[in-house]
Amino acid sequence: MTKYFTSEEANRALPQVRSLVAQIMQAREAIIQAQPELWPVLEKSIGNGGSKKAGELLTEFHRVEHGVRGLQEIGCVLKDMSLGLVDFPALRDGREVLLCWKYDEPEVMFWHDLQSGYQGRKRL
């Protein structure tokens, strides 16, 4: 069953959401920084050679997974890792919409239709 948020409830959840999104964004950045080394690491791992770098990358992937799972437990959805974009299911005039928050915003200030996405954001 979908949990619907009011803007007040979404804003109350922001400290925890912000922490999880920061964790996801930091892990994403570490993975991107390691990208030039990724193929050799994967090739070596496939051959059962193992590697310290593979273990480090696995830790970062686990950080992303933990963060996404934490957001899901709260009831919101990560929409874009690079922007830190999160949607909160909500009801507006009796129809399902999404409250929309971006990592650099101080609070939840926007919403959009289910189909319009980030480009269709409107001020609350």
Image (tube, rainbow, N blue to C red):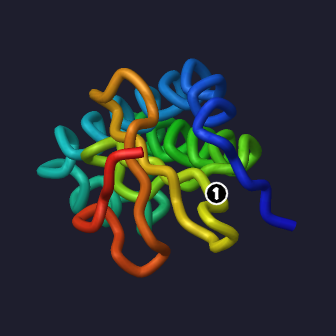
Residue hosting label 1 = 90
Left or right of 29? Residue 47 is right
| Number of numbered tags placed on the structure image | 1
Occupied quadrant, residue 106: top left
Q: Residue furthest left?
A: 36
Q: Residue furthest front?
A: 93
Q: Depth check: 120 or 93 in front?
A: 93
The amino acid type of the residue labelled 1 equals Ala
Q: Residue at x 30, y 53 (%)?
A: 41
Q: Residue at x 66, y 42 (%)?
A: 6
Left or right of 61? Residue 40 is left
Question: Which corner quadrant holds the N terminus?
Answer: bottom right
Q: Depth check: 76 or 122 in front?
A: 122
Q: Position of residue 22 (x, y in %)?
A: 41, 27
Q: Residue at x 63, y 43 (%)?
A: 71
Does the rendering let one see residue 51?
Answer: no
Q: Residues within 10 Å of mark 1 (few under 14, many from 20)?
A: many
Q: Residue furthest bottom?
A: 115
Occupied quadrant, residue 83: top left
Q: Position of residue 66 (x, y in %)?
A: 63, 40
Q: Residue furthest right?
A: 1
Q: Depth check: 95 or 82 in front?
A: 95
114 above or below 44?
below
87 above or below 2?
above
Q: Residue at x 50, y 43 (%)?
A: 64
Does the rendering let one see residue 110?
Answer: yes
30 above or below 73?
above
Occupied quadrant, residue 9: top right
Q: Secondary structure at mark 1?
A: strand
Question: Which corner quadrant holds the C terminus?
Answer: top left
